[in-house]
Amino acid sequence: MALTKVQDAMLVTGRPPKYLAVYNGGDVVSGGNNGEIGVAIGRDPRFLGRRGITTPTSEQTTTWGNESGKRNPTVIKDEHTIKLYYEGYDGTRWQVFFEEYDLNMRLRYAHNGPIIKYSDIAGATSVERPSVLYDPDDATWPYKMAYCIATSGINGTSLRLARSADGVNWSHLGEAWGLGTGWESTYLTTTGRILKKDGVYYLFYSGNNGAPVGGWRSGVATNSDWSISGWTKNPNNPLIEPRGQGKQQLAATIFAGDKTITVASTANYDVGAPIVVWYEVTNAYEFNVIDAKLNGTTLRVRYPFQGQYTWNDGTSGPCYCCQIHSGNVDISEVWFEDGKWKCLFSVFGFVPDFGLESTGYAETDNLDDGFTIDPTIWPLPMSNKREVFDRTSAENLHFVRIE
């Protein structure tokens, strides 16, 4: 008999996991919007271990309309089940899908087709980023959803709300707000998480000002009820900012087996932070971790490099190094624990024009002060030797507590 993912975790750790998480996986080699949903588990949501992908549904793709990609999952736990919501791609547009699992992540039910279609909303060309809250205090509408729609192409520009009695059939309430200014001026999406704390709803969301690198930020808005009016944005939005050094050309060649990197300046790098070194022309790359700053131009890394990376050989072009928290930052999961607000966030765009994506951690005592990134915590470490489906992307991480 095959072991469940939870039983497998007990064999590895000796203890049952507290947390079950889902995330985006992707392989840039596949191109386009291909992707799958990964499963991870652990005793701490900051340190998780991969445990495969969700049950395939490809045998029903002719009716499901998600045969070309799955991404941006969110997960909740109610009295007896784990409910998974995600975007499915039909090759042209995104729509919201639903699957239900038991606590061992064995599939119980998969809805035949999307539960929210772009055709459900006038003017929508895609429906994306479902963010769901289980709210048992509301006996009539215990399930709340925020999502975004695109009105041109597949990039969200409007946040909308819905509610449900069963988590499957949704009543649409309308638009909560649309595009704003600054970092909210070009795209607008939910982040995948809604919280309810002390009777107040916290809806975390993200925006972009049109810049491919460094343009994404995240903030929060609050409301005392689940309605489309009355939302107050935190005046200190955005709540999280990139950290560390972005693209910087190597000042000396890295040879296979080396554990040092020479750059123009080490000032903006963080000890303990993950970095990536890559050829811009061929996109050959390696991840590593900074162990020390030896001086103003030299970093020592934790693992010997497997390949050679020239500073500029005149043929392949120069190589570069950057800290992975230095590009776009996009909150995906938020929780309140031990008197602190804690969040997981996606990092992407740290290698310009190349689709590497990962996950980071930040926390704060007060949302008004914003989140501070801890560059040493890397919840889903990336490697170019992972499974194919998440070789270059492990982001948009959400979890539920199962113990």
Image (cartoon, helix red, strand yellow):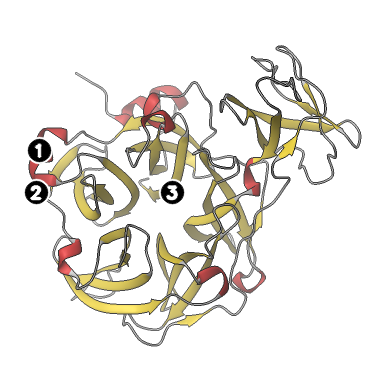
**Residue drawn at the location 63% of the way across and 41% of the way down:** 324
CA separation, marks 1 and 2? 8 Å
Amino acid type at mark 2: Asn
Residue assigned mark 2: 112
Q: Residue at x 65, y 36 (%)?
A: 274
Is residue 6 shown to the viewer in this render?
no
Relative to residue 382, is residue 168 drawn left or right?
Answer: left
Task: Classify mark 2: residues with Cα within 10 Å, few (<14), some (14-19) or many (20+).
Answer: some
Q: Give the camera-side residue of 43 and 162.
A: 162
Q: Which mark is residue 60?
A: 1
Determine whether 70 is above or below 363 in the image: above
Residue located 18% across and 39% down the image = 107
In contact (CB < 8 Å): disc 1 and disc 2: yes
Residue at which label 3 appears: 396
* Alpha carbon distance from label 1 to label 3: 25 Å
Q: Secondary structure at mark 2?
A: loop
- Ranked by sequence position, the earlier of labels 1 and 3 is 1
Dot 2 or dot 3: first in sequence order is 2
Place of residue 162 in the rendered image (x, y in percent of width and height, measured from the top left): 24, 72
Q: Residues within 10 Å of mark 1 (few under 14, many from 20)?
A: few
The quadrant of the rendering that contains the N terminus is: top left
Check disc 1 and give the amino acid type: Gln
Q: Nearer the viewer, residue 164 or 393?
A: 393
Q: Where does the image place residue 161, in percent across and percent down from the top left?
A: 29, 73
The quarter holding residue 199 reads bottom left
Looking at the rendered structure, the kind of residue marked 3 is Asn
- With 382 as the anchor, is 247 left or right in this view? right
Secondary structure of the residue carrying tag 3 is strand
Q: Earlier in the sequence, mark 1 or mark 2?
A: 1
Secondary element at image label 1: helix
